[in-house]
Image (spheres, grey):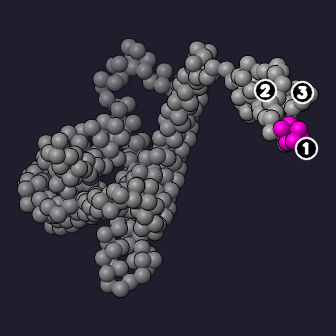
Amino acid sequence: MPEASQTADVPTTPAPGPRLSSGIPSSEAVDAPGASRGPSREVASPEAPEEHATPYGRPGKPLAKNPFLLGLTAGLGLLTSLALALALVTSYSVIVLVVVAMFLALGLNPAVEALQRRRLARRGAISIVFGGVILFFVLFGMAIVPPVTQETASFVGAVPGYIQELLANPTLKELDSDYQILTRIGDYITSGGLAQTVAGGLVGAGAVVFNAFFSGVTLLVLTLYFLGSLPSIKDYLFKLVPSSRRQRTRALGDEIISGIGGYVAGNLLISVIAGVVSWVFLTVLGVEYALALALVVAVTDLIPLVGATIGAVLVSGVALLQSGTLGIACAVFFLVYQQVENYLVYPRVMKRSVDVAPAVTVIAALFGGALLGIVGALLAIPVAAAIALIIREVVIPRQARL
């Protein structure tokens, strides 16, 4: 028995066996003769998890550093940019219609909100305002189309008389004897060249009229949709702003929208005043087509800087064809009225709408006209006012804190 106890007290050590490079004994060393038979544990090598995670081998270098891939990515980016540019150029007319429709919706929104404050539902207010817009276009067409049709018919009926007078002219007879002008004109007419030219002109004119009508209807429909969904559009756009800046952005956005709406409403009011005053003056003087000419003045007065001058020249020219005295009287009247409008009417109407320096107004109108024509000139002033507001409320305070 003592011998058994002495044997039990002797610690058993595993026999030396082959070891891995990491110093951990292998399974063969554990199973060697004379070793203790305790619970065996397999110790995996450090490379085993990585090989299990990537059974197909280690990944190579990032492909972003491959020159071929860089060139391919740059080429695809260039092609994408070119495709986007071509898409913008192709859809230029659609973009202009959308921008103008949103601009008109912002301009009509103050009238809708004014009706809403009288406890009228928004749909009812939109129906009243939009009905007024459609009524204006109907009255404009009824006032413009009959005079233009009548004058065109009169001109067509007078063409034979003009031709007879030309044929009886001695100078034309002499030129015809020298250069056979009338003979060449007759050959051109009988050859069918005139018919083809006239037909092509009629087709082109018809296409222009159809496109104008389609664009007008599309503009009215888009304006109606934007006017109806303007609150939801505003809320959706403001949700795209981070929540920490949403309140300030909403305040600035509401101020910009209010300024644009006030500018459009004020510009419309100034045009209405110009049209009414012109109609009263032309009616008192007895100028023909006074209502149509007054509507021309009202529409052209919407164009910044040069619109009032264009309307005055057109109306004065029509009056001059009727009588020299009427033409001079119209020219003097519009010259005086433009001064009154520029220094009395415009500042009073626009004092709460836009706050833009006169020099900035002129520069913005010139740039807008160069980029988008009449539409750009109309949009330039409220856009300049919005940029001025952002600079005044955001940029300048931030620069003052630096």
**Label 3 sits on residue:** 32
Query: Is residue 388 magenta-colored?
Result: no
Residue 216, placed above or below residue 57: below
CA distance separating discs 3 and 1: 28 Å
Residue 246, placed above or below residue 54: below
| Circle 3 SS class | loop
Q: Which residues are magenta?
A: 1-8
**Label 1 sits on residue:** 1
From the viewer's perspective, tell me whether residue 14 is left or right of residue 236.
right
Residue depth check, mark 3 versus mark 1: number of the one nearer the observer? 1
* Closest to the observer, 124 or 202: 124
Q: Residue furthest bottom?
A: 119
Rate crowding at label 1 as few (under 14), some (14 to 19) or many (20 or more) other CA atoms within 10 Å: few
The majority secondary structure of the magenta stretch comes to helix
Q: Position of residue 360 (x, y in %)?
A: 17, 43
Q: Position of residue 344 (x, y in %)?
A: 8, 60
Residue 272, placed above or below residue 388: below
From the viewer's perspective, tell me whether residue 4 is left or right of residue 198.
right
